[in-house]
Amino acid sequence: MSQQPYVIAISGDSGAGKTTPGSSTCIFIWKCGLATIDDYTEDAIHPPTLDWLKNGANPDEFITLQFVANLKVFTGR
């Protein structure tokens, strides 16, 4: 029986400590891949923070194509 891959998403402000539980979880899960958004900052396109906040803080305004592509590989989609 084959298991479907799944994604565990951890959200929080910058510096909140998201990477630590993510890394710890991967130690205990076999065949775990860890993708942190911090690894993709050079490729990310995002609006200036103050403008983004004033305009409603739409997360769809952040473009992280390589992050999304890697996430699709992890999940087999």
Image: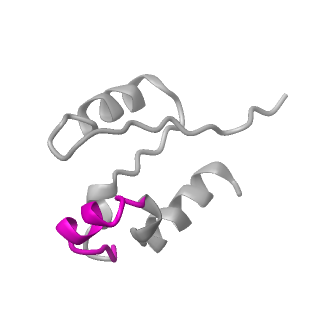
The percent coordinates of residue 14 (x first, y second) are: 18, 47
Quarter holding the N terminus? top right
Height in image: 28 above or below 32?
Answer: above
Classify 23 as above or below 39: above
Q: Nearer the viewer, residue 76 or 42?
A: 42
Q: Is residue 23 left or right of residue 35?
A: left
Residue shown at the point (56%, 39%) measured from the top left: 7
Return the residue found at the far left: 15
Quadrant of the image occupied by residue 15: top left
Q: Is residue 51 magenta?
A: yes
Q: Which residues are magenta?
A: 44-58
Name which residue lies at 41% across and 32% down.
26
Displayed quadrant of residue 4: top right
Work out whether residue 61 or residue 9 is closer to the camera in this orientation and state it: 61
The residue depicted at 34 percent of the width and 51 percent of the height is: 36
Look at the image and name its color scheme: one colour
Residue 56 appears at what percent x and percent y?
36, 59
Q: Is residue 50 highlighted in magenta? A: yes
Residue 73 placed where, x, y %? 60, 59
Q: Position of residue 29 (x, y in %)?
A: 49, 26
Asked if 47 appears above or below 71 in the picture, the reply is: below
